Amino acid sequence: MANSNTVSLPDLAATQALALRLAGVLRAGDTVFLTGDLGAGKTTLARTVIKALCGVEDAPSPTYTLIQTYDTGGGELWHADLYRIEDPAELDELGFDDAFGDVIMLVEWPDRLFGLVPDDRLELHLEMVEDSVGEAMDRPRQARLTGFGQWETRLDDI
């Protein structure tokens, strides 16, 4: 069973505020799946979390490196973009299975995990609000947060 809620994100500042609330509750071993269409704000949200937890001002997107790692001062944070993963063996090479449960994981395109899904996870789905206009970065969005395992009770903390 999962616990879920939806948050309205009328602008970029609201998306960043959600990311800061998320950063405030993350701890070693947490996994967050970031889903949504291209341009939905997954990387923007991840960068805000990274800035809050690691002090990195302009974190690069892991689109080509697949994983960027950061030091939170209390452990590692991995930001993964699995868009280019095509085979489960690639995940083995990256050490994903060993990292789950030890580091904070922010995973974009988690559908490319080929079933390697931890029981305890937060799924955060971002989507543009229908019929909205304006610059892509500042268009209204909504976030659906779904908690599994321990995240079922922690969801209210965000």
Image: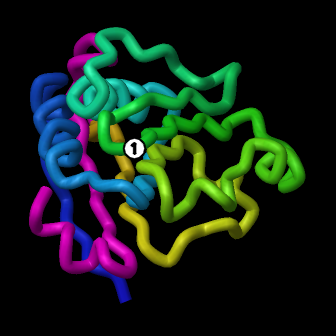
Q: Which residue range is magenta in the image?
A: 131-158
Crowd band around label 1 with a 10 angstrom C-alpha radius: few (<14), some (14–19), many (20+): few
Q: Residue at 18% x, 54% y: name it.
A: 25
Give the percent coordinates (x, y) of residue 60.
49, 14
Image coordinates for residue 122, horizontal then vertical, percent: 37, 62
- Residue 142: x and y in percent read 23, 45
Q: Is residue 91 left or right of residue 5?
A: right
Quarter containing the C terminus: bottom left
Quadrant hosting residue 63: top right
Give the position of the N terminus as an image quadrant.
bottom left
In the rendered image, the residue lying farthest to the bottom is 1
Up the image or down, 13 lies above or below 101; here it is: above
Q: How is the image coloured?
A: rainbow
Q: Is residue 46 magenta?
A: no
* Nearest to the observer: residue 65 or residue 45: 65
Up-down relation of residue 9 to residue 68 (above or below): below
**Residue appearing at x 31%, y 35% in the figure:** 73
Above or below for 132 versus 56: below
Q: Does 14 sit left or right of 147 as displayed?
A: left
Residue 23 at x, y percent in the picture = 22, 43
Q: How many marks?
A: 1
Q: From this viewpoint, is residue 35 visible?
A: no
Image position of 114 (left or right of 24): right
Q: Which residue is mark 1?
A: 75
Q: Could you tell me if residue 94 is visible in this image? A: yes
